[in-house]
Image: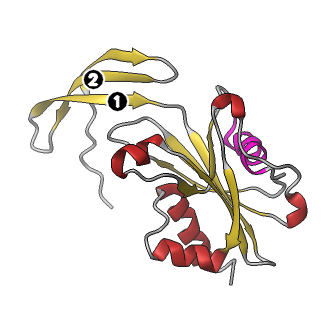
Amino acid sequence: MSHDHKPTPRGLDETILADEKYSFSRLTYELRRADGRWERHERNLFRRPDACVLLPYDPARGQVLLTRQFRLGAFMNDRTPGLLEACAGTLDPGEAPDACMRREAMEEMGLKVDELRFLFEAFVSPAATTEKLYFFIAPYSPDARVADGGGMEEEGEEIEVVEAAFAEVLREADAGAIRDGKTLTLLYWLKASGMMD
């Protein structure tokens, strides 16, 4: 692949519109087009910390562990009451992605993760947010479920832990019943890997 034209902004100016848990800004800048002209842009940007996501899988029993919880963005879009998702969480300042993933697996699913495999990193919605996701998988067995999970009540979380047959989850994904992007990415990666055959 050729990457001869690498746009770099000039005159970047940021105005913070809201700064609570995360910040929301208006940015203006100029980008040089491939034909050499400079073009002015104005965009809004949501600054979020990076996050991690995990799909635990049990090849011996053909099961995966997922979570279900209310998501405001999905509800405000089409009244989706709750999303079936892979376990995920936001990195604390200075926290390594693997440490974050182990912490979130325990908080959300009561799962003690031993063998954690990093797959790749990817931007979530790069036109609108700075957030980048670190994708993981991990094998598990029933005895790794050492606590109830359910999330952190003080953070407003109420998370249902869902253990289901991988084949059934794939059928639901194919039918459009699973609509979370990070979860679909991991489910189809695991299918393509052949590790659950």
Whether residue 125 is visible, yes or no, is no
Q: Which residue is mark 1?
A: 45
Most foreground residue, 155 or 194: 155
Q: Position of residue 89 (x, y in %)?
A: 62, 41
**Direction from residue 105 to residue 193 in the image, left or right:** left
Q: Name the N-terminal-most of marks 1 and 2.
A: 2
Quarter of the image with the C terminus in it: bottom right
Q: Position of residue 134 (x, y in %)?
A: 59, 48
- SS at mark 1? strand
Decide whether residue 105 is among the magenta residues. Answer: yes
Most foreground residue, 126 or 64: 64
Q: Position of residue 2 (x, y in %)?
A: 29, 57
- The CA distance from mark 1 to mark 2 is 7 Å
Residue at (59% x, 73% y) in the render = 169
Is residue 137 placed above or below 44 in the rendered structure?
below
Is residue 195 placed above or below 81 in the rendered structure?
below
- SS at mark 2? strand
Residue at (62% x, 47% y) in the render = 88
Give the magenta part as a residue range. 95-109
Q: How many marks?
A: 2
Please, what is the three-letter code of the amino acid marked with disc 2? Leu
